[in-house]
Image (cartoon, rainbow, N blue to C red):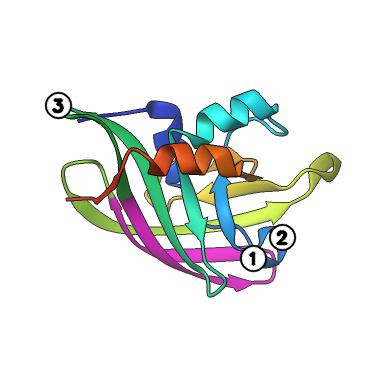
Amino acid sequence: MRLFPIAAVALLLPAPVLAETGPGFWSYPSTPNLGAEDLTALCETGFSLIYADGHRQSFLRVDTDAGPRLILDSEVECRTDGDQTACAGWVSDGMTQSDSTTVTRFDHPDGTLRAITDVMDGSAPVTSYPQLCPDSAVRAAFALGATPAP
């Protein structure tokens, strides 16, 4: 299996503050305010589904011998305290699952929602700009068929 790198980075990020974003299908690009075409293309390779209770599932498009498929590549529970959200659960690298813990701070530079995520593994924080996926992109991704991660 080969993962799409840009989607892999985007999907490892935790769910943003629900009051900021609300439930739905979200992408976490490293560039704010993507154009419609770029956001659609990114969302067709994967997205996070945020539930109202803070639960989040991430889906990622992967290439398999049978063709492209959408896999459930992470599942986390998130709790918000002020401008921070802490998430814990599991993430898959396509071969195995491992525990995942993240803490994300949110702010609004220039009026754009920004998420700065510490993946709690000693690596540098990751900055992203959460954006809602277009319905058509989500439908196109799910049309591939969704399967659970290993």
Q: Quadrant of the N terminus?
A: top left
N-terminal of the pair, mark 3 or mark 1, is: 1
| Vertical order, 26 against 99 (above or below) | above
Cα–Cα gap, marks 1 and 2:
5 Å
User: CB of mark 1 within 8 Å of CB of mark 2?
Assistant: yes
In front here: 51 or 32? 51
Q: Secondary structure at mark 1?
A: helix
User: CB of mark 3 within 8 Å of CB of mark 1?
Assistant: no
Q: Is residue 4 left or right of residue 31?
A: left
Crowding near the residue tagged with mark 3, few <14, some 14–19, many ≥20 C-alpha atoms within 10 Å? few
User: CB of mark 2 within 8 Å of CB of mark 3?
Assistant: no
Q: Position of residue 80 (x, y in %)?
A: 60, 71
Q: Is residue 53 magenta?
A: no
Q: Position of residue 66 (x, y in %)?
A: 16, 29
Cα–Cα gap, marks 2 and 3:
39 Å
Span of residues in magenta? 73-91
Which residue bears the numbered disc 3? 65
| Vertical order, 86 against 64 (above or below) | below
The amino acid on which the numbered mark 3 sits, given as a three-letter code, is Asp
Q: Secondary structure at mark 2?
A: helix
Q: Secondary structure at mark 3?
A: loop
What is the quadrant of residue 64 in the picture?
A: top left
Which residue bears the numbered disc 1? 18
Which residue bears the numbered disc 2? 20
Q: Is residue 84 magenta?
A: yes
- Residue in the picture at 60% in, 40% down: 128
The amino acid on which the numbered mark 2 sits, given as a three-letter code, is Glu
In front here: 88 or 140? 140
Cα–Cα gap, marks 3 and 1:
37 Å
Q: How many marks?
A: 3
Q: Is residue 8 left or right of residue 133?
A: left
Crowding near the residue tagged with mark 1, few <14, some 14–19, many ≥20 C-alpha atoms within 10 Å? some
